[in-house]
Image (cartoon, helix red, strand yellow):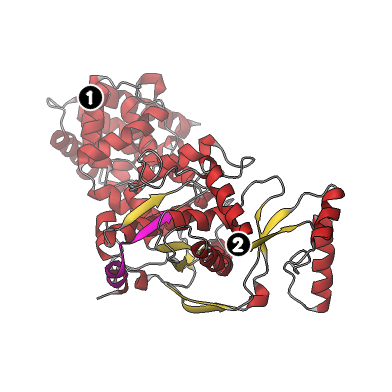
Amino acid sequence: MNASQQQSADSPVRVRFCPSPTGNPHVGMLRTALFNWAYARHTSGTLVFRIEDTDAERDSEESYQALLDAMGWLGLDWDEGPEVGGPHGPYRQSERGPIYADVATRLAEAGFTYECFCSPEELAVRREAAKVAGRPQGYDGHCRNLSDAEIADYRAAGRDPVIRFRMPGHDFRWDDLVRGELSFRAEHVPDFVIVRANGQPLYTLVNPVDDALMGITHVLRGEDLLSSTPRQLAMHAALADIGVGSGRTPRFGHLPYVMGEGNRKLSKRDPESSLAMYLERGFLPEGLANYLALLGWSFGDDTEFFSLAQMAERFDIARVNPNPARFDLKKCISINGDWMRVLEVDDFATRMLPFLQRAGLIGDVPTDRQAALVAAIAPLVQERIETLDQAPAMIGFLFQEGAAFTMAEADAVAMVDGSGSALAVAAESLQALSEWNTPAIEAALRTSLVEGLGLKPRKAFGSVRVAVTGRRVSPPLFESMELLGRDESLRRIEAARVRAEAAADG
C-alpha cells in the first residue's frame, strides 16, 4: 500500500486550494491546484476550493473570476466551493467575517491571544537592536504580559492594539508529506499578529480556522509557506482546545519551488509565469496541465506524456521531489505540440477558430467557404504547429484574396537567380491542367521544374511556395494550391514572377 492509499484508509481525504484573488493566475499557483486536485481524485477524496479574499485593498472581482476561469480551463473541478456550494460555506473569506470574529473572541477568552500596542517604529528599533546583538529578530514579547494599568495607559494614549497569538514556547516537529521529518526551534517562531488594529483578521487566523471548520486533512502548498507551518500547528492545537473543528491537525506537504532562468525562483513578473501568456499564445489546457505535473512529480517511469485522468490514477505524494523544479518553456511548448497532434481533427479545427477570428481572417460567424477551408486545412497544419497562435500566419494565405494577400518573406526568395523563369514555367504548366487537384498540380510542377529545368525539388518548389503562401514554411504546397483554387494560385504566381524579373533587371 503506497502513502496515498494509507492516508486514504485512515480517513477520507479533504484537501483545499485557497488562492487570493490578486492579479493574474500564475503557473506556480496552478501547479499547487493541480497537485491538490490529483491527490483528491486519486484517493476518492474531496477538493475544497476556497477564496482567501480578506485583503480588500488588493483583492478584485476580476481576479476572482480569472481564478474560476483558470480552474475551469485546466479541467480542475472542485467538490466544494464557489458556484458549487457545500456544507461548510460560504467559501469566500470576505463573507465569513462573523466566524473569524467569534473565534478570535474565544481564543482571547481562553488566553491564547493578547493585545499588542507596539508601534511599527518601536518594533523596527527593537528588531535592529536584536540584529546587532545576534538575537532572533522576531517579536520580542514586549506586550505579552501587560498589566491592566499598562493596557489602560496605552488606550488612554490613543493606541489601538493588534491581536497577537501567544506561542506555546516549545519546539515544533512534524513529518512533512514531501520533505520528511522537519523541526523548528521555538525561538524562531515568535508570537504573531492574527487581527489588525482595525479589526481585520489576517491570513494567520483565517487560514487555520477555515481548515479546521472545513475538515481539511492534508495541506499541499508551496515551499515558500514552510516557515509558517509551526504557527499553523500551534493555532490548530489552540482551535482544538476551544472546540473549533474536529480537533484533528492536517498533515502538511510542501511542494518544491519552481525555478526560472538563472536558477532563481520563478517570479510573478516573469512572462512565462502568467497564465495569460499561455491563453494568448494558444496553449492547450491538456498540454499546460501535463507540463505543470512534471514540475516536481513523476509518473513513476520515463513517461512524460499523460492526461489528467492518468495523472490522478497514478498520483502519489511519495513521488513529489522536494528539490526545486526548473521551468523550461521550450519543453512546455514541445509537450503542447505533442498534445496538438493527438487531438481529433474536428476538435483541433474548433480550437483554431478563435485565433483565426482574432487575426481578422474570418468573421465571428464563418462563411460556408471559410468553414470548409478550416476543416480542409486542419489536418495539414495540425502536424506543423505547437501553439494555436501559430495558425494564422501558417494558413492565413487561404483566407486572403487579391490585394489582401501579402508575401512577408517573398522578396528574398523571389530574388534567387532563376526564380522569375522558374515561376514562368510553373505558371505555364499549371495553366494547361484540365483538372485542379493535388495529384495533377504535383505532377505538373515536378515535370516542368524538376525534370524540365533540372532543379532540385526544394529550389524548384521554394519560389512557388512563397508566391502562393507568402512563407518559406507552409502546409503541404500542392494541397494548399488545390484549396486556394486555380485562379488565385495563378494570379499569385504571376505577381511573384513580375516582381522577381523586375528585381533581376534592377
Label 1: which secondary element:
helix
Name the disc covering residue 486, or none: 1
Nearer to me, 186 or 259: 186
Nearer to me, 120 or 58: 120
Asked if residue 237 can be seen in this view, the reply is yes
Determine which quarter of the picture holds residue 476: top left
Nearer to me, 341 or 311: 311
- Residue range corresponding to the magenta coloring: 6-16
- Crowding around mark 2 (Cα neighbors within 10 Å: few <14, some 14 to 19, many 20+) is few
- Side of 425 relative to 28 (left or right): left
- Side of 220 relative to 113 (left or right): left
* Residue 13 drawn in magenta: yes
Seen in the picture, residue 501 relative to 118 is either above or below; the reply is above
Residue 229, position in %: x, y?
54, 67
Nearer to me, 44 or 390: 44
Name the disc covering residue 110, or none: 2
